[in-house]
Image: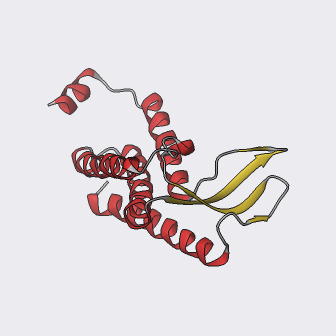
Amino acid sequence: MKLSISLSIALIVLILDLASKYWVESALEFGQSIPLTSFFNLVLTYNPGAAFSFLSEETGWQRWFLTGIASSAALLIIYLLNKYKQEKLFCTSLSLILGGALGNLYDRITLGHVVDFLDFYIGTYHWPAFNIADSAIFIGAALMIYESFRHKENPETAEKKIK
């Protein structure tokens, strides 16, 4: 897959993520919840931590720590997209992860937290709220796992990748 196509996929994810967050922030007040179905709400919440609010109770250092991790991951992903451009599904998964990482990175740098708004629940149990970027990262990771089981390399191909 051409690098330009991979980066275009990441850009589309980034645009969808930022546009959805902008819309939710303009339509809802912090903490407001709008029930849409018996298992889904739109809710405006902020997460200063990582996935599942990991590190969210810290004093603020996590903002820059997580920014550094996301920035490093984005650079590594761009390198991998270029190196393995012949692996279409692998590059698609990396592109989704890159777009999601950049969406949450933008929030972290500009706001100091990530905007979350998708709230799925069963009864009184609510899954932690998430956003489009998180969804793209999850789908990209799932595709990567699928690809790892689907893709059986012969020893010559594996050796070429190592070099």
Residue 148 in sight: yes
Q: Is residue 5 left or right of residue 34?
A: left
Q: Is residue 121 left or right of residue 29?
A: right
State which quadrant residue 99 falls in: bottom left
Residue 85 in sight: no
State which quadrant residue 89 falls in: top left
Quick one: 46 or 98, which is closer to the camera?
Answer: 46
Quick one: 27 or 77, which is closer to the camera?
Answer: 27
Quick one: 61 or 126, which is closer to the camera?
Answer: 61
> Going 28% across and 58% down the picture, which residue do you hit?
2
Q: Is residue 132 left or right of residue 117?
A: left
> Where is the N terminus found, in terms of image quarters?
bottom left
Q: Residue 130 at x, y = what percent?
A: 59, 53
Disc tally is 0
Q: Residue 40 at x, y = what percent?
A: 76, 56
Where is 13 relative to 49, above or below?
Answer: below
> Going 64% across and 67% down the picture, which residue do you hit?
30
Where is 14 relative to 135, above or below?
Answer: below
Q: Residue 137 at x, y = what percent?
A: 48, 49
> Going 27% across and 47% down the picture, which residue do you hit?
72
For the view shown, which residue lies furthest in the bottom direction?
26
Quick one: 111 or 39, which is closer to the camera?
Answer: 111
> Where is the C terminus found, in terms of image quarters?
top left
